[in-house]
Image (cartoon, rainbow, N blue to C red):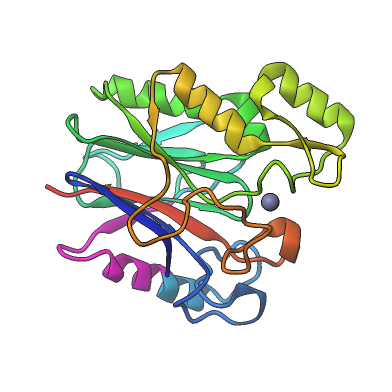
């Protein structure tokens, strides 16, 4: 079920893999979205398995409808977590609410200031990197009192696999130079993960090494690893893995 798990005091983080669910076909088995053709009942079941596996007291899952933008949605005491807002980042000061970002090649970023009790989850694909979803998320966390923020960068397509047209490489690199890359076969590419890490580091955020106890690297490549869902490898009808972050009381 988990590609990676970590703990920081009262904060828990996890990235899922594609095992341990009930979906079939290209969604086998722990697909966490019904936006790409899977049976909604299977997806609900998979989300519930994830939720119950994360322990007691039960967490409430907060989802978002991601659109490759930079809008941040704050989940607070006035929010009904059953709502699925259009946003590419979720931030909360609440305990026992698990923020969920769903991806297949884009970069899932989990963030926490354990002392301030603020956690966040962001979806950073190529457009989100350029639009600045990561700095926008950090800003929303600061507004809620976060100061010392730690980040975990989850599984995504790596810079050696993410081939793009040269003009696209140039356009993105003009905004985030660290994303400039070449594929392993020598063509223009983007390293969105490197771009995200650069934005985090520039903002003074400590990026976790990603080598969690007993698990493989958090940031491993979705295209190269059959245990993960990948849009590039599987096509449009692919499942989604999740990054999840929560805080206990
Ligand atoms: Zn790769």
Q: Is residue 38 left or right of residue 5?
A: right
Give percent across and percent down for residue 191: 67, 36
Give percent across and percent down for residue 90: 40, 39
- The mark tally for this picture is 0
- Which quadrant is the N terminus positioned in? bottom left
Instruction: Tell me where the magenta segment starts and ends, as one range.
Output: 47-63
Is 114 in the magenta? no
With respect to residue 21, does 185 lie above or below? above
The single residue placed furthest to the left in the displayed view is 249
Q: Is residue 209 left or right of residue 133?
A: left
Residue sitting nearer the eye, 174 or 214: 214
Q: Is residue 69 visible?
A: no
With respect to residue 50, does 29 lie above or below? below
Q: Is residue 167 visible?
A: yes
Give percent across and percent down for residue 167: 87, 27
Instruction: Report the residue at 33% width, 27% height from top.
Output: 141
Q: Quadrant of residue 4?
A: bottom left
């Amino acid at each position: 079920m988990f590609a990676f798990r970590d703990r920081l005091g009262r904060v828990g983080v996890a990235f899922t893999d594609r095992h341990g669910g009930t979906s079939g076909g290209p969604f086998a088995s722990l697909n966490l979205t019904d936006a790409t053709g899977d049976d909604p009942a299977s997806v609900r079941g998979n989300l519930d398995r994830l939720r119950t596996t994360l322990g007691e007291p039960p967490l409430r899952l907060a989802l978002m409808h991601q659109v490759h933008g930079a809008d941040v949605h704050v989940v607070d005491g006035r929010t009904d977590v059953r709502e699925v807002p259009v946003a590419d980042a979720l931030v909360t000061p609440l305990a026992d609410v698990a923020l969920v970002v769903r991806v297949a090649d884009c970069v899932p970023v989990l963030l926490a200031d354990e002392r301030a009790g603020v956690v966040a989850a962001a979806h950073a694909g190529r457009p989100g990197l350029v639009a600045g979803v990561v700095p926008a998320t950090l800003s929303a966390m600061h507004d809620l009192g976060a100061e010392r923020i730690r980040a975990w960068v989850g599984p995504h397509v790596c810079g050696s696999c993410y081939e793009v047209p040269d003009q696209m490489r140039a356009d993105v690199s003009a905004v985030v130079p660290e994303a400039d890359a070449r594929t392993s076969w020598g063509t223009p590419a983007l390293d969105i993960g490197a771009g995200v890490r650069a934005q985090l580091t520039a903002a003074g955020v400590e990026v976790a090494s990603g080598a969690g106890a007993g698990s493989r690297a958090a940031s491993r490549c979705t295209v190269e690893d059959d245990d993960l869902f990948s849009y590039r490898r599987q096509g449009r009808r692919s499942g989604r893995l999740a990054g999840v972050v929560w805080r206990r009381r």
